[in-house]
Image: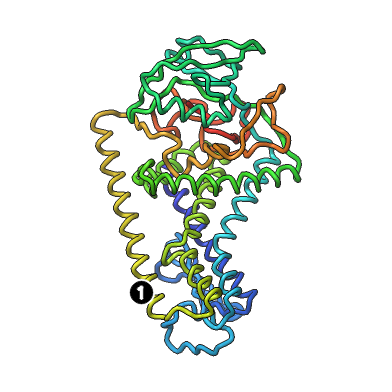
Amino acid sequence: MYYLPLLLALGLLVALHELGHLVAARLLGVRVTRYTLGFGPAVFTWRLGGTDYVLGAVPLGGSARIHGMNPHEPGLDPADPTSFSAQRPWKRMLVLMAGPLANGLFALGILVALYTSGTHVVVPLTVGTITPGSEAARAQLLPGDRIVSVDGTPLASWAEFVELVAQRPGRELKLGVEREGEPREVTVRPRPDERGAGRIGVSQQYVYRTHGPGQALLQALAHSGNLVIEGTKMLGRMLQGKQGVVLNNPVGVVKQSSGAAGSGLGAFLRVLVSLSVALAFFHLLPLPSLDGGRMLFVLFESVSGRKVPTRVETLVHAVGFLALLAVVLTVALADLRQHLGRADTSAQDSREPGDNPLSLWERGGMGASPSPALPDGGLPDGGPLVTPVAATPDAGITKHPAASTEATSPPDGGQLLTTDRPGE
């Protein structure tokens, strides 16, 4: 139902990325011959400052045609001072970086707005809700209980607690709990979900907080950096085979995001931030045909003093683009087959919130900096690395978090931001 606005928003994020390249090129004296918003036949063209601004019939995506970026451009004069190829390496590097930077600044701006308007943040390691009939309910855990250890292992974050429980389905665990300042111990046996990960059916507790402009900016900066760190960790797990590539693909992103988009404007803005950061991160990967890959060639030239032959660079980018396209199509088809297979056996989607690119929201504080508990349940000194999520999943139920109608937003309608994965 919400695929269309999501796709339009994603297209605008791509157009914003290309606009970043355009602005940087113009500021550095590089000519941009054409900027297109969307694709298909042109429905409107406006020429300004030597650049044709074109509106395509289908307003999805965008592109900026920078003079000289294509070394095989007809009539290209290598000595043309307005050509991209004629610029010094540092200028070309700035033009290439401007696209991801535009996406990053957009995400940062929305984050600051969310923080200043008031947010819900988690109370570190504190139980918020308990699923009836779950292992947590059987063990008589209560809202407000603070979980401090698992089998004697002290916990630094809720995400660490989630991972420890997920790794031990069917095994008896002893949880160290503090209730009103009194230590106690409870025993649980995590139940495996449809993917075999252990779950006991609890989610983390939230408190409502407002932030001044300065604190909101610091929080947004810290959070944006943490998203990049977690994205790097996720990529590392994928390369090591510890996290399926099938679970991190465009189809999964669209399904997660479209469900979150139906939860209101705040949730939709959080989705935009997630997608914008993911887009910037993706383009900075040092892969051929991406901004990061092109930056590697510029860096090589800066260090070695020798320029890579034009034909070699073109061939590398062309092969890289085809390889990326093949990977995207492969994992998208694999995800579709997996989804259809689950549909044959169950009407519920068992996708976990940490298994897709949007989980960067939910894992934002994981492993980056422990969040100590505070007496008032508020923010640690300096604030945690807080992370917006599209929805608060009911961790004891194995349905798609974005499709859940339970706890999709804070009770008072405020924005929901978390430091750790809220559900377990």
Compare residues 420 and 41 and report the one nearer the observer: 420
Q: How many marks?
A: 1
Coloured how? rainbow
Residue 118 horizontal side relative to residue 389, left or right: right
Quadrant for residue 29, please give it: bottom right
> Residue at coordinates 44% horizontally, 71% vertically from top-left?
42
From the image, tell me which residue sits under label 1: 315
Quadrant for residue 340, please give it: top left
Residue 70 horizontal side relative to residue 305, left or right: left
As displayed, is residue 58 above or below residue 71?
Answer: above
Circle 1: element type:
helix
Disc 1 residue type (three-letter): Leu
Q: Residues within 10 Å of mark 1 (few under 14, many from 20)?
A: few
> Residue at coordinates 36% horizontally, 26% vertically from top-left?
193
Residue 382 horizontal side relative to residue 347, left or right: right
> Residue at coordinates 58% horizontally, 65% vertically from top-left?
98
As displayed, is residue 275 above or below residue 157?
Answer: below
Residue 265 % position (x, y): 57, 41
Residue 268 % position (x, y): 53, 43
Q: Quadrant of the N terminus?
A: top left
> Residue at coordinates 60% horizontally, 54% vertically from top-left?
106
Residue 312 % position (x, y): 38, 77
As displayed, is residue 8 above or below residue 184?
Answer: below
Residue 214 % position (x, y): 76, 45
Compare residues 168 and 287 and report the one nearer the observer: 168
Compare residues 142 and 241 and report the one nearer the observer: 241
